Amino acid sequence: MTEFRYLTAGESHGKGLTSIVEGVPAGLALSEALIERDLVRRQGGYGRGRRQQIERDHAEITAGVRHGFTTGAPIALWIENADHANANWQVRMAVEPVDTPVERVTLLRPGHADLAGTQKYSLDDVRPILERSSARETAQRVAVGAIARALLAELGVAVRSHVFAIGDVEARVPERIDWEAVEASPVRVADTAAAPRMIAAIDAAREALDSLGGVFEVRASGMPIGLGSHVQWDRKLDGRIAQAMLSINAVKGVEIGPAFANARLPGSAVQDVILPAPAWERRPWEHATNRAGGLEGGMTNGEDIVVRAALKPISTIPRRLGTADLLTGEETAALYERADACVVPAAAVIGEAMLALVLAHAVLEKFGGDHVAELRRNCAAYLATVGPREPRE
């Protein structure tokens, strides 16, 4: 079985971020420019802070690609942290022991990994925890996600996102989304009327030394029917997708399709009627609606995969909240270095990457292939079998 696997390493203010990607077939067109497009999108969005003005993320491909095509070997990516050039960070994050005294971070930040991480790893300094648990790591996930996106595109699958809500401002989602307009929107919203209200809400939160969360939606179109499996809990594709989305910093809730709205309706209003063959327009087996969000029984059903994720307001805010000191337990004010007022538009791009990563794994699991051409042939051969079944003797 072919698997799409990856690991990342690196700290927020260390020298840089590294990832190794395994399982990508040979023959996939790949370039640093292709990856950079998604990295630029991740750094955008109204409400981002000063860090995005420092970093100009670029993923250097150091292995696994030759003359513009993958070789089938592991792919290695390197993203330099420009902020590390600051002399203070070179001392604070030095790999070797240093003679200069380095101040411990002991002011625990509410809502972060600080308290749990220092207790788990028996540390008397929060710095190692906050550096690795930082959302800076998601730059590598987006870079790897760009590779997954390119692989999915070989089978005609497209992964896109838009923002559904920021704070208490909800967007009206049109039946047909203008994805170019979403990309042009500073808040990645499909509803142009909601954009200025979202921007105003972010400005108000920043003025109040606060932050805002929200909800983003990711959609994957063109997925073949039958990926994933119902036979074991850990092979159900909706479970894998939920785990991937919940791994994004500050995401605390996930729904497949309009799950929470479905929960308030009778079953007759929720199930997606399967259309008969004369009504099919795009492919064999279509549904009248898509309230299941493209997944039934842990498998793709041929409709668009639709995932929404709820992002809590980020925990680092200029208004220093009350906390306790790690070393003494005494009351104090939380550490504050810098932060964004709202990251929902950027989180949507990260959500795209995470969905693409899960789907790329599912595609390789189902179709395999050591070369992209083989992958396409395997997929085409399978799709030729999809449709009404002839009785078997």
Image: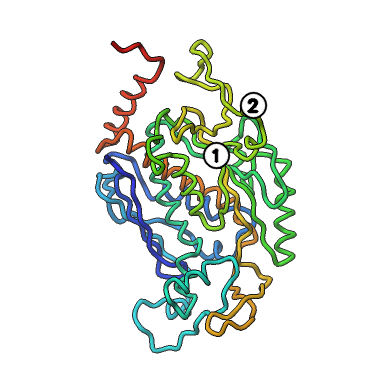
Circle number at residue 39:
none
Label 2: few (<14), some or many (≥20) within 10 Å? few
Q: Secondary structure at mark 1?
A: strand
Q: Is residue 379 above or below residue 330?
A: above
Say how many tags the image has: 2
Q: Position of residue 247 (x, y in %)?
A: 48, 54
Report the Cα–Cα distance between label 1 and label 2.
16 Å
Q: Position of residue 184 (x, y in %)?
A: 61, 44
Which residue is drawn at the image coordinates 40% and 44% (left, top)? 234
Q: Nearer the viewer, residue 391 or 305?
A: 391
Residue 1 lies in quadrant: top left
Q: Nearer the viewer, residue 66 or 118?
A: 118
User: Which residue type carries mark 2?
Assistant: Ala
Which residue is drawn at the image coordinates 33% and 28% (left, top)? 379
Q: Nearer the viewer, mark 1 or mark 2?
A: 2
Which residue is drawn at the image coordinates 31% and 12% (left, top)? 392
Which one is earlier in the sequence, the residue at label 1 or at label 2? 1
Q: Is residue 214 above or below residue 265?
A: below
Q: Which residue is mark 2?
A: 269
Label 1: few (<14), some or many (≥20) within 10 Å? many
Residue 92 lies in quadrant: bottom left
Q: Secondary structure at mark 2?
A: helix
User: Which residue type carries mark 1?
Assistant: Ile
Q: Which residue is mark 1?
A: 256
Q: Nearer the viewer, residue 80 or 12?
A: 12
217 sits left or right of 174 in the view: left
Q: Are marks 1 and 2 in contact (CB under 8 Å)?
A: no
173 sits left or right of 127 in the view: right
Q: Position of residue 176 (x, y in %)?
A: 62, 30
Q: Is residue 296 above or below residue 88?
A: above
Which residue is drawn at the image coordinates 38% and 39% (left, top)? 232
Quadrant housing the C terminus: top left
